[in-house]
Image (cartoon, rainbow, N blue to C red):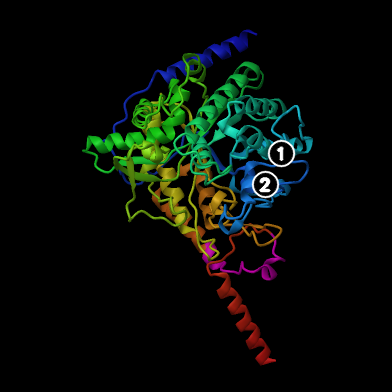
Amino acid sequence: MLRSCVFTVCYVFMLVLRLSAAEDFDWTKNDHSSFYYGTFPTGFSWGAGSSAYQTEGAWDKDGKGLSIWDVFSHKKGRIQHNETGDSSCEGYYKVKDDVSLMKELKLNHYRFSISWPRIMPTGVKSDHVNEKGIQYYDDLIDHLLDNQITPIVTLYHWDLPQVLQEKYGGWQNISMVNYFNEFANLCFERFGNRVKHWITFNNPWSVAVEGYETGEHAPGVRLSGTGAYRAAHHIIKAHAKVWHTYDTQWRTKQRGLVGISLAGDWGEPVDLSSQKDIEAAERYVQFYLGWFATPIFHGDYPQVMKDFIGRKSVQQGLGTSRLPAFSPQEKSYIKGTCDFLGVGHFTTRYITHKNNPSGRASSSYFTDRDVAELVDPRWPDPGSEWLYAVPWGFRRLLNFVKTQYGNPIIYVTENGVSEKMLCTELCDEWRIQYYKDYINEMLKAIKDGVSVKGYTAWSLLDKFEWDEGYSERFGLFYVDFRNKNKPRYPKASVQFYKRIISSNGFPNQREVENWRRKAVETCSSSNQLLAADPLTSHMEMVTEIVVPTVCTLSILLSAIFLMFLLRRRN
C-alpha cells in the first residue's frame, strides 16, 4: 500500500513539474544546420506501425462487427478505384510472418491498433464480447513479447462500430464518451497485464475534420463549421475519461502509461520578420495540434481558437460560438491527462495571413483560421499530393511542443513517406533520404532538450490508404495486393532503417553513406521480376531485397518477346 502511494505521489509531482515548465517558442530562430552525426540516448526505442483497418483484412470473419470504414469503403465513389480494406494485407492471418519481419528489422516496439468492432461487434459490451477477436490480439501481443518487441497499442484508429454511428451519430453524440470508456476498460482488463503503452486516439484531427466536416473519410458526414468542433469536443472528453479510468482502476496494478497520438504538420511563417505571418503560423499550428494538446495539457482550447471562432460566430449572427465550451469542472478533469504525447508528423507548410469571408454559408474549420498555406516548389514530393519532404520542420515542431506543453515525454508515433507510381519500385532511395533527414532532425531536437523517447516508422507494410485506396504506399515492406497470399518484399529502406536501429543513430559520414550504397546496390543488382500474378504466384516471401524497377507492362512485353525468340529457335 505504501509503495503504491509513493508511486502515485511521485507521478503527480513529475506531472506538475512538466505542466509548469512551459516557455515561449522563438518563431524567428530557424536553424537549418548541416547533418549531425551522433547517436541517440541509451534505451531509445525504435519501431514501426500499422492500424487495424488498414492491414488486418478479415473484415467479416470470426464474429467481427461492421465498422464505419467497412460501410464507407463499400459505397461507390468514396474510395479511389472503389477499393476496400476487406482483405488488405491479410494481417489477421499473418501474425507470425509479420512479427518475423519486425524481428529481422531489430525493432524495439510495434505500434498497432485494436479494432473496436472486432472485440465488441456492436460497440456495446453488454450486447456481446467476441472472444475470437480477443484471442487474435492475445496471440499478437504474446508473439511480440516472445520476440522481445514491446507492443504500443492504439485504442481508436478510426474504425468506430457502425451500430454506434447509425444509432447515435457517432462522435457527434456525447454518449460515445461512455461507450469508448467501456471498450477501453475491457482492453485494459484483458491485455493490460502485458501492454504498458496505451494510445487513446490516433490523429483525432482527421477523425473530426475529414469524418464530420468535409466527409472525405468515414462516416462521410458533412457538417461544415460545426461537425468537426463537436466531434473533437467529445473525443477530448473521451480521452480524459479513459485516462482517469486507467489512473484510478489499473495504474497501480499494471504500471502502464496512457497517452494520445496527435498529428502535427508544421506551419512556418512565410516572412520571419512579419508579425502577421508569425501570428498566422502559430494560428495554423494551434488549430491543428493545439486544438487537442492545449486542453489536455492546460485544460482549455487555445485562446486564438476561442477568439477567432467566437468572433466569426458573432459576425454570422449566432448567439454562441460554434466552438463548444468546457465547464470549469471539465477543464480541471481534462487537464494533465497525458502520460506521454504521441506525435505524428509528415510535412510542413509555409503560412501567411489571409482574410476569409465570415458569412454563415462560408463557415468552416478551414475559413475560421484565416491562413493561406504555401509550398516551396523545390520541396521533394514523391508520393501523396499533400506530403512534401521538409525535414527541418520536424525539429521546429518538436521544439514547439517542448516550449508549449512543458517538455512532455514524446513518442514519435508516425513518420514516413509514400510513393505514388504505376511502376513497382523497391529501390526507394527517396524514402531512405526522407528517413535519414527526418530522423536526424529528431536527433537535433533531442540535443535541443526535447524529451523524445521513441520513434515509429510509418509504416511497416504497404496498406489500405483510406480514401486513396491502394494507390499510395508508405511501407518499408512492399505488399503484392494482386496476389491472394499478399506476399511481403523488403524495400531498400528496410536495410537502411535496420542500420540506423543497430547503430542507434548515425556514427559517422563514411559509415552512413556506406549503408545507403549497400542498400541501393542490393536492390539494383537484384533487378528481378515482380509483376503479374501468373509470374509471381509461386514466389514466397524473401529476406533479400528483390526487385522491380520497371513497370508491369514492360515486364510482360519482355516475357512475350522472349517466348517469341524461343519459338523461332525451335
Q: In what quadrant of the picture does the C terminus appear?
A: bottom right
Query: The magenta stretch spans which residues?
Result: 522-540
Q: What element carries label 2?
A: loop
Q: How far apart are marks 1 and 2 (CA)?
A: 11 Å
Q: Is residue 105 left or right of residue 227?
A: right
Seen in the picture, residue 293 relative to 215 is either above or below; the reply is: above
Dots 1 and 2: beta carbons under 8 Å? yes
**256 lies above or below 208:** above
Camera-near label (1 vs 2) is 1
Magenta span includes 524 = yes
Q: Residue 65: where, in percent of width, then height?
A: 72, 40
**Can residue 154 be seen in the rendering of this structure?**
no
Report whether residue 284 is seen. Answer: yes
Residue 140 is one of the magenta-drawn residues? no
Amino acid type of the residue tagged 2 in the rendering: Glu
Q: Please name the residue shown 26% across and 38% down the image.
A: 277
Q: Quadrant of the N terminus?
A: top right
Q: Position of residue 530 (x, y in %)?
A: 61, 66
Instruction: Give percent across and percent down for residue 387.
Output: 43, 50
Q: Could you say which disc has been placed on residue 56 in the image?
A: 2
| Residue at image mark 1 | 118
Residue 279 locus on image (x, y percent) = 29, 34
- Camera-nearest residue between 203 and 359: 359
